[in-house]
Image (cartoon, rainbow, N blue to C red):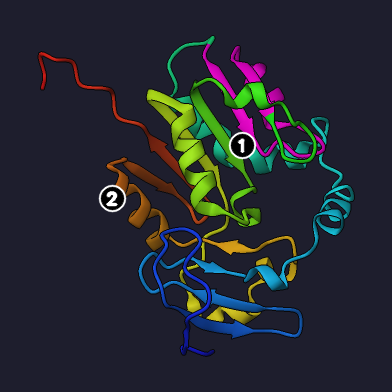
Amino acid sequence: MNDTPFPSSPCPLCGHAPIRAFHRDRFRAYLRCPVCGLIFVPPEDRLPPEEEKARYDLHQNHPDDLGYRDFLNQLARPLLARLGPPPLEGLDYGSGPGPTLSVMLKEHGHRMALYDIFYAVYPEALARTYDFVTCTETFEHFHNPREEWNRLVGLVRPGGWLAIMTLLIDDLENFPDWHYIADQTHVSFFSHQTFQFLTARDGLPVEFIGDNVILIQKPEEKSNADA
C-alpha cells in the first residue's frame, strides 16, 4: 500500500490536506486522510450517476425477506431498546429501492418518513427534525460525506438518535482483500477512528455495536437554569 502525499484532493469529510495515496486496484485509487482516517475514492474514479443507479436497481431487498430482516435487526434491535415508547417520529435516510427498515420500525408503532437520492426524493422530509434517523448501508455510498454528516446530525432532535450501519475498516493491512471495496458504488470507508473523530469534534456520545453499527445520541439542549 502507498502512503505518499496526494495534494490535489482535501479530505471530503474533515477537509484536511494533504491526504495520502493509500491503495490502487485495477478499477480505482483509494486515498486516506491522516487526521480522521476516512478512506475514499477520488471523484475521477467514481461511477457516473446513471451507472450507479443501475447497480442499485439490481438490489432485491424486500420486507418479506426474512434474511434481510435479520441483517437489519443488527441495528433495529439495539435502537429500539434505546428509544422511548412509541409513537416516535423517524426518518430512514437512504431507504433504497426496497424500503424495509422503515416497515420494521412501523411494526413497533413508530411513524416513519423516507428519503433517498434516487428512490424517495422527498425534499420535505429534510425540512424538519426527527426523534431518530436511521442510515443503513448508505454511508459507504456518500460522495460528499461532510455535507451528509452535517445534514444527518441536523435532522436529529435534541435527545434523539442517529443510528448508522456501515461496515468499519480498522485492519488497514487487509484493505486490498476486503470484500467491501469490490462494490464500485462504495466510495467512502469509515473506521472506529473516523466516527470517534467526528463525535469528539461535535460533542456527541457514540456507541459501537459489533463492526458495523454506530449509535449516536444527540445531547439534550441545556435550559437557561443549567447554563
> Residue drawn 74% across and 41% down?
68
The extreme front residue here reads 8
**In the figure, 193 relative to 207: above or below?**
below
Q: Is residue 201 left or right of residue 50?
A: left
* Residue type at tag 2: Ala
Quarter holding the C terminus is top left
Real-space CA distance between mark 2 and mark 1, rounded to the nearest whole angstrom = 27 Å
Q: Position of residue 14 (x, y in %)?
A: 41, 59
Q: Is residue 96 magenta?
A: yes
Q: Position of residue 64 (x, y in %)?
A: 83, 30
- The image's mark for residue 73 is 1
**Residue 143 appears in the picture as rendered:** yes
- The image's mark for residue 200 is 2
Mark 2 and mark 1 in contact? Answer it, CB < 8 Å. no
Mark 1 surroundings within 10 Å by alpha-carbon count, few (fewer than 14), some (14 through 19), many (20 or more): some
> Residue drawn 49% across and 26% down?
132
Q: Is residue 111 left or right of residue 68?
A: left
Q: Which residues are magenta?
A: 88-114
